[in-house]
Structures are given as structure tokens and as C-alpha cells.
Amino acid sequence: MSELPTPSNAAVGSAERPLRVAVIGSGPAGVYAADILTKSDEVKSGELTVSIDLFDRYPAPYGLIRYGVAPDHPRIKGIVNALHKVLDRGDIRFFGNVDYGTDLSLDDLRKHYDAVIFATGAIKDADLNIPGVELEGSFGGADFVSWYDGHPDVSREWPLEAKEVAVIGNGNVALDVARVLSKHADDLLVTEIPDNVYAGLKASPVTDVHVFGRRGPAQIKFTPLELRELSHSQDVDIILYAEDFEFDEASDEAIQSNNQIKNMVGTLTNWFAEQPEDLSELTASRRLHLHFLHSPVEITDSPETPGKVAGIRFERTELDGTGNARGTGEYVDYPVQAVYRTIGYFGSPLPGVEFDHRKGIVTNDGGRVLDASGAPVPGVYATGWIKRGPVGLIGHTKGDALETITHLLEDRTALPVADDAAENAVVALLESRGVQYTSWDGWNRLDAHERALGAEATANGGSHGVSVERERIKVVSREEMVSISRDGAGAVVGS
Ligand code: NAP
């Protein structure tokens, strides 16, 4: 029940009746949007008062940073510190373990908030439509990332039985997947990897990881730092192939005009130049092969063990002068026992919201969510990968959030006014539904617990017989995360 009479638009945003905003998703996109709104000129000048609740389906905050960034990328994890500072201020409430669509519907949100911003990202793999994609041993890269990042909703076990593996795609996710697959598990112990992930990787018999791009070395979507990092893995040799070094006019132009491409083509060329002609002179126990101009055609079945991946067939491609590739009619087979598809992420539809199934995004215009007729849905917005698709680095999400918030502020006087905007109304609703939501204080408890696990392992001389300093060990199970977060103090919301 509302404690306040329903106000007119004019009264919304006053000190007595703040503009109530729900943000769905506490990854970088959601936190940036909430932060930008609280720091807007309107709010800073006192013209507008806002009250923001941030919801996440996971018991912990940070979305992609916790469940999408490779564990051996602490530099990117540093973004967590910035996000932590925003949420630790206390002016944005965090509700974890709340699933939009199950625990809260759009109608619920519209009843309690004047505006809703979806920042749910993209976590599924884009489809690769080739025969054999359903075979056992054919994996979505995004699922593997979720596994090694200790995502609460994926199986604890991952079948790492292959000696030879193919990774399809030439983006940074392909590099992450190939690096984690080829790296020795002990070298990942300095990271926050959960014990089940260490155990799985430690037992992996892998010897050769092949990464395949369908275009040339100047068309890669890697970034320079991430590419160079491949050579830092211990006891892993990188192997390149002369026939893959093809450059067309568009490649030359890209190399001249784009420093990143120039830099990466330089890295690949140097690696190739340093490689012995006789590959048997290489000494590492694992090899990471980088192939270009290979377009996947079919994942092949095993005659001995039907239903299991036994290989992968590619059509060799050539550049067409514009940087695009065309098939040559030449086919080549590689024996592999596992295939990882890392050809991009794809967004998932959200109940009650129009979805563009071709692009995998919420239908929107500059962050204003549109209905089936193309008209803006008053008070409903989107930001981040669910708004523009899974492209760009984390920092790019800030500009995106700024656009969405600018539009929200432009629409401010025309927003539909929530019936029941009292801050405790949504808490009462969640409790009435038995939702075991977590809070910011709860996250601080879980964070401290994970750090304590790391400190304990360090004090005991490391992990698994390897002497390493461990900053944190992630808790994986949702039940355990919720119970540690809610421990003792019950559900303390906000700060
Ligand atoms: P991405 O950068 O878009 O790369 C996708 C790759 O898949 C491209 O090489 C693409 O080739 C290829 N591909 C697409 N469809 C294909 C098909 N049918 N057959 C063969 N290859 C196909 O996507 P991503 O790697 O998922 O990365 C998503 C975003 O996250 C990027 O902005 C990335 O930089 C970022 N990210 C950053 C890091 C980091 O450490 N900095 C880590 C992970 C992700 P074409 O170019 O020919 O289309």
C-alpha cells in the first residue's frame, strides 16, 4: 500500500517524492547508468532528487566483471574497485538474487518506479549454423567462460577430455578461451578461480589448441594487449602458418590507418619470424596455433564413437580486396575432440519488452525502449549490451549509459508516475513472495568471506601444493552465496 498519495509529474523528483528508478543488472552498464544519473546536473543542482534501486539476478554484483572477465585479467577486474566505490556511497540500493521476470515483473516495477532501465547484458553464445554443432564436445564459449568464472547456474563439472581443441573466432573471447584452455592450471592459482575449476583444468590432457579466424591477420578483432598476453603463458608455444599471412588492399589500408591493427600484425609477424622452420624444435608441452583464412563448414562426427566430435572441416578463404573473405573451394580437416564457438555473444529476450531477435537486443532508440509499433514505451529504457549488442570494451558502456540517462532526463516530466513509490514497498513485495534477496551489506560479507578463503590458503602455504598468494577464492554455489550474504543480520538493505 502506498504511503503517499499519487503525485502529479510536477511533484516527482522533489525532496519529498524522489524520482524512483529501477535498474535491472548490476554489471558495468547498470552501475554506470545509476552513477551518471546521480551525478547529473539536475541532481547536483538540487533541481531533481532521485532514489535508485539496482537489481541483479545473481546474489553478487558486477555482472560481466565477475562472470565474464577471465580470471587472469586482474587489470580489468580493477574496474570492480570503481564500481564498488559507486555502490558503497549508500545512495543506490542493491538487491541481489532477484530475477526479473520471475521474482519481479514489468508491471511490478512500473507500480513501484517511475522509470526502469534494463542493463542485462548478453550472456548467450551467438549461433553457429553448421552441421555437427550439436555433437558432444561442441561447446559455446560463453558457457565455458561462465564455468571458469564460477557462475552459480552452470554445472560445476566441465568435460576437459580433449587433447586437440578448436576455438572458432578471432575476438577477445576466443583469446580468453584459448588462453585458459592452454595455460597450465597451476599458473592460474594466483587468480580467484574456484577449486572445481582448478581441478578440471589440472586434469586436462590438452596438448594443442587451434584458434581459427575466417578472415586475415589484419581483420582480427583482438586487442593488442590481449594478443601479446598469449606469449606470456609458460610452457606454451605459439605456432603460426606462412600460408595464412595474406594482406589485400583493405588490409594495407587498415595497417596504415589503425595503430592497433598495425601493432597486432607486427606482433604476429614477429612471432612467425622467431618460430623455427622445423616445428619439432619447439619444446613446450602445449601448443597454441593461430590460423587465419579458415571458415568453419562442419564439425565432424566420430565413426568409432558416434555423436562425439572427431574433427572440424574448414573452407580456406581468400581476401577479396575489401577486407572480406570469400571461399576458395579448398577444404581442410583438423582432428580435434572439442570445438569451442566464440563468435560473439547474443542478448536474451526480457519478458514484457519488445525484442529484436535478429540483433539480440531490446528494441530501442538511443536507449528509449520501443513497443511493437515502434513508439517509445514511457519510462522504460535500456543501456549496455542489451541496448546496442555485445561489442566494445567495458569503458564504452559509459557513453552508452550517458545517452540513455540524457534521454530519461529529457523525458522526465512525461514519465508515468508510479502508484506506490515508497522505498519500503518493493522490499515488502519481495518479502511477501519469499524472495531471498541479498543486499550491499550482504555483498560485503560475501566479499570478506571470499577474501578470507584466499588469505587462509595463502597462510597455509598456498593451494594444491603450489605456493601462491591468493587474494580471493570465489564461492560458486548460489545457496552458499545467499546464505553467507544474508548470514545472521537477516536482510539488511542499503547502508
Ligand atoms: P567479437 O570481438 O565480435 O569477435 C567475434 C569473432 O567471431 C570475429 O573474429 C568474427 O569474425 C568471428 N565470427 C563471427 N561469426 C563467425 C562465423 N559464422 N564463423 C567464423 N567466425 C565468425 O566478439 P567477442 O570475442 O565475443 O568479444 C565481444 C566484445 O567483448 C568485444 O568488444 C571484445 O573486445 C570484448 N572483450 C574484451 C576482452 C578483454 O580482455 N579486453 C575479453 C573478452 C571480450 P568476423 O570479424 O569475420 O565477423
Image (cartoon, rainbow, N blue to C red):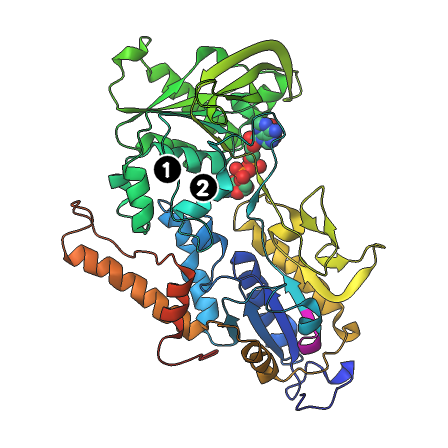
Instruction: Indicate the position of residue 485 as horizontal and vertical percent values.
Output: 39, 71
Q: Quadrant of the N terminus?
A: bottom right
Closer to the camera, 293 or 301?
301
Q: Badge 2 is on which residue?
A: 144
- Is residue 462 at all visible to an observer of this figure? yes
Q: Amino acid at mark 2?
A: Phe
Q: Is mark 1 within 8 Å of ligand 1?
A: no
Is residue 367 found left or right of 336 in the rendered image?
Answer: right
**Residue at 44% across, 63% down:** 60
Q: Amino acid at mark 1?
A: Val
**Residue at 57% across, 73% down:** 53
Q: Is residue 275 above or below residue 111?
A: above
Q: Is residue 118 above or below residue 111?
A: above
User: Magenta segment: does it hold 75?
Assistant: no
The disc placed on residue 450 is: none
Q: Secondary structure at mark 2?
A: helix
The disc placed on residue 180 is: 1
- Foreground tag (2 vs 1): 2
Marks 2 and 1, how far apart in space?
A: 10 Å
Badge 1: few (under 14), some or many (20 or more) residues near its Cα, within 10 Å?
many
Closer to the camera, 59 or 362?
59
**Residue at 72% across, 61% down:** 352
Q: Is residue 19 above or below residue 166?
A: below
The span shown in magenta is 111-115
Instruction: Indicate the position of residue 252 as horizontal and vertical percent values.
Output: 58, 19
Is residue 194 found left or right of 146 in the rendered image?
Answer: left
Q: Are marks 2 and 1 in contact (CB under 8 Å)?
A: yes
